[in-house]
Image: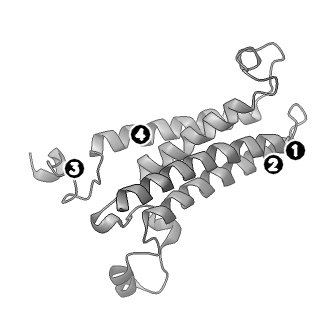
């Protein structure tokens, strides 16, 4: 088996796998896709008044599920689609932030994303944007109600993710 398929002792840095092995990264991506599907279905199907979702609420509104759910979504997105390389520069999500000036410039610049902190914010904004879209869809569903406090709960979950990982990044750079 060649070195690329096996991974390496340095965490995959020479093979382009990042800190996580390719198998682990693929598993996280699969869980992220399942998370996206689950969140989407839960946001658009009718709610049962006495269903398991209402029975498991810690608070009367159930906002804790939004906070925890979107924190986990941002975490999965971060670990599933980011490849950290040398010098703590992030190489992932090039399709979202690639420069459009040409192949020569792309090789030289390697995209717009330069810091891990920027990638953390990009993950957070992407997941938060998706939550806003799902809440917006609920406006048009007669059996669902739009609730801006759900968006606030989603934002708190994503914000906590960003703050924790930005603080961790700052601490590791010292």
Q: Which residue is mark 2?
A: 136
Q: Is residue 163 left or right of 31 when viewed as pictured?
A: right
Q: Are marks 3 and 4 in contact (CB under 8 Å)?
A: no
Residue 2, given in percent of the width and then of the height, sits at 10, 50
Lower sequence index among marks 2 and 4: 4
Cα distance, mark 2 to mark 4?
Answer: 28 Å
Residue 47 falls in image quadrant: top right
State the separation of the CA atoms marked 1 and 2. 6 Å
Foreground tag (1 vs 4): 4
**Residue furthest out toward the right:** 142
Query: Tag 2 or tag 3, which sits nearer the N-term?
Result: 3
Question: Residue at position x 88%, y 31% from top?
Answer: 143
Q: Which mark is residue 28?
A: 4
Residue corresponding to mark 1: 139
51 over 65 or under it: above or below: above
- Residue at x-position 47% and y-position 36%: 31
Looking at the rendered structure, the secondary structure element under dot 2 is helix
Between the residue at mark 3 and the residue at mark 1, the CA separation in whole angstroms equals 46 Å
Mark sitting earlier along the chain (3/4): 3
Under circle 1, the secondary element is helix
Report the Cα–Cα distance between label 1 and label 4.
Answer: 32 Å
- Image: 3 above or below 99: above
Q: Secondary structure at mark 3?
A: loop
Q: Under tag 4, what secondary structure? A: helix
Residue 10: mark in rendering: none
Mark earlier in primary sequence (1, 4): 4
Which residue is more in the foreground, 158 or 49?
A: 158
Q: CA distance from mark 3 to mark 4?
A: 16 Å
Q: Which residue is mark 3?
A: 11
Query: Does label 3 or label 1 sit earlier along the sequence?
Result: 3
- Residue 53: give x, y in percent of width and height: 72, 20
């Amino acid at each position: 088996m060649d070195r690329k398929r096996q991974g390496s002792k340095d965490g995959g840095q020479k093979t382009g796998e990042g800190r996580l092995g390719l198998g682990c990264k693929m598993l996280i991506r699969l869980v992220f896709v399942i998370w996206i599907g689950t969140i989407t279905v839960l946001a658009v199907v009718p709610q049962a008044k006495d269903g398991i979702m209402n029975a498991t609420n810690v608070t009367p509104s159930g906002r804790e599920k939004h906070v925890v759910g979107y924190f986990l979504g941002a975490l999965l997105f971060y670990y599933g689609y980011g490849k950290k390389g040398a010098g703590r520069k992030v190489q992932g999500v090039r399709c979202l932030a690639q420069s459009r000036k040409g192949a020569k410039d792309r090789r030289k610049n390697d995209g717009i994303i330069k810091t891990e902190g920027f990638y953390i914010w990009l993950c957070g904004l992407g997941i938060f944007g998706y939550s806003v879209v799902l809440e917006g869809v609920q406006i048009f569903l007669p059996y669902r109600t739009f609730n801006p406090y759900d968006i606030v709960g989603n934002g708190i979950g994503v914000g906590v993710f960003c703050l924790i990982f930005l603080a961790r990044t700052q601490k590791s750079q010292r």
